[in-house]
Amino acid sequence: MPESFKRGHIRNALNIPLHASHVDREAILGEPVQLRDSSIVVYCQSEGCPYSDIVAHQLCEDGFENILIYRGGWRDWIENE
């Protein structure tokens, strides 16, 4: 788990590494059918970070639905908490 995630993250957040495989992502989140009625919010450290787009795309390819991207990221979250 990255140090930045250990230092702070949105409550109940899970860390999905950028280069995680389909199997790794499924181990972290469960199977897509289990989250059919849930939204998954993906975010990075700050606004403009491209990694949330990449992970969101990977999750869509894995069959997850209702993927949202929090564009402001962690920094925006703590500034507006």
Image (cartoon, rainbow, N blue to C red):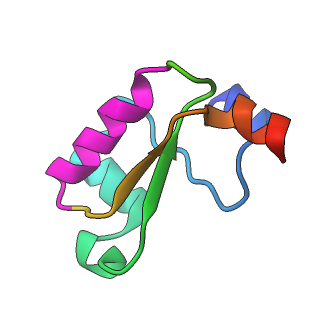
Pick the quarter of the image with the N terminus.
top right
User: Is residue 62 shown left or right of residue 48?
Assistant: left
| 10 over 55 or under it: above or below | below
Q: Position of residue 62 (x, y in %)?
A: 18, 54
In the depicted view, which residue is nearer to us: 61 or 25?
Answer: 61
The region drawn magenta spans: 49-63
Q: State whether the magenta stretch is mostly helix, strand or loop.
A: helix
Q: Position of residue 46 (x, y in %)?
A: 62, 24
User: Is residue 47 shown left or right of residue 23?
Assistant: right
| 8 over 29 or under it: above or below | above
Q: Position of residue 22 (x, y in %)?
A: 23, 48
User: Is residue 61 shown left or right of residue 66?
Assistant: left
At x 35%, y 55%, the residue is: 67
Q: Quadrant of residue 21?
A: top left
At x 72%, y 44%, the residue is: 9
At x 35%, y 75%, the residue is: 35
- Is residue 75 covered in magenta? no
In the depicted view, which residue is nearer to us: 47 or 9?
Answer: 47
Tally of marks = 0
Q: Position of residue 30 (x, y in %)?
A: 36, 69
- Is residue 55 covered in magenta? yes
| 4 over 32 or under it: above or below | above
